[in-house]
Amino acid sequence: MAGPDRWHRWLLEVRFGGDAAAREKDLAEFLYPVRDAVLDRARLEPGQTLLDVGTGDGLIAFGALERLGPSGRVIFSDISQDLLDHCRAAASAEGLLDRCRFVLAPADQLTAVPDASVDAVTTRSVLIYVKDKARAMREFFRVLRPGGRASLFEPVNVLMSDPGPGLFHGYDVTPVKALAARVQALYVSIQPPGADPMVDFDDRDLVRHAQDAGFSEISLELRVSVKNRKDPVPWERFLRMSGNPLQPTFQEALQQALSTQEAGELARHLRPLVESGTGLERTALAYLTAVKG
Ligand SMILES: C[S@@+](CC[C@H](N)C(=O)[O-])C[C@H]1O[C@@H](n2cnc3c(N)ncnc32)[C@H](O)[C@@H]1O
């Protein structure tokens, strides 16, 4: 048995290092506030239909069901059948199935969703995985009714990559920088800057794609934050985590890029920094709202 796909594995386990308390903290401090901001910007009215693209485990979609009231409907779409099955089971357990539809489709090919059939389209951290973002934006425009809103949240990774060669995940690795560079090179080989969908766009591209798709009113808020502290993370959990679903866990990356002795040397330097939160946290997050005139 192969087990669930990488998207399911990452969303339900790897992003929190398999730690339920870390999941609760992330939900309370980051994910629920983002969900609420995305849904506020979608300006939903009771009884409307929302399409959540790249729905994952349904963060935005289940929030929308609550806001739309008993006659509102939500289309969960994703490229991961495992995540759609997960959402379907959760919706069934809540008695919500009759208000839900599940569509297996990439964001740039939403063929199963008819033209002008939904009132709102949402994404959270989805376009970052889509190569043809312009086409995805045209699909969002196509499926929206006149007056419909797209409300998107996307990290803008090119604005928040580590600024110096001595930094690794924001931790100062100057004394072991040659080893850290080899692990970094592994990440770069998997997601080459400028070519990988995650690092081939910035906030201006998002606005341009929305404009080219035909949206009549577009607004983008960019939130950039730099903090000279990170959340402390227990080392064993850090080893089980990865920055995104396409990357190996830190432990796998160490094993692939370094010998056992080298991995031990890097870990000895990094561990106290990770466990004490001594590092630089940089984020760049965009909220884009676009109205179909
Ligand atoms: C970081 S997760 C975000 C999940 C969810 N939107 C949330 O807010 O928690 C990215 C999601 O995008 C989906 N995805 C990846 N590539 C996609 C594509 N080309 N089209 C549609 N969905 C995609 C993944 O399966 C995953 O569910």
Image: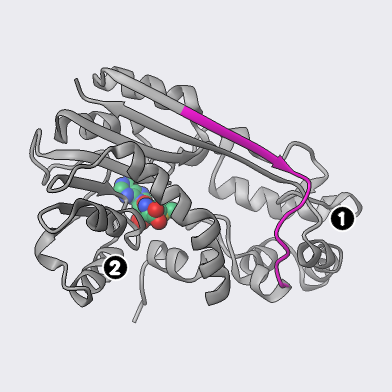
Residue 39, given in percent of the width and then of the height, sits at 33, 45
Q: Which residue is mark 1?
A: 176
Crowd around label 1: few <14 · some 14–19 · many ≥20 (10 Å): some
The foreground one among 206 and 226 is 226
Q: Is residue 215 above or below residue 14?
A: above
Left or right, 286 with reference to 138 = right
Q: Quadrant of the N terminus?
A: bottom left
Residue 232, given in percent of the width and then of the height, sits at 73, 64
Q: Which region of the structure is painted magenta?
A: 221-234
Asked whether the viewer can see residue 274, the reply is: yes
Q: Is residue 229 magenta?
A: yes
Q: Dot 1: what SS? A: helix
> Upstream in the sequence, badge 2 or badge 1?
2
Point 25% across, 58% down: residue: 66
Crowd around label 2: few <14 · some 14–19 · many ≥20 (10 Å): some
* Quarter-of-image position of residue 56: bottom left
Report the amino acid beneath label 2.
Asp
Residue 243, given in percent of the width and then of the height, sits at 57, 56
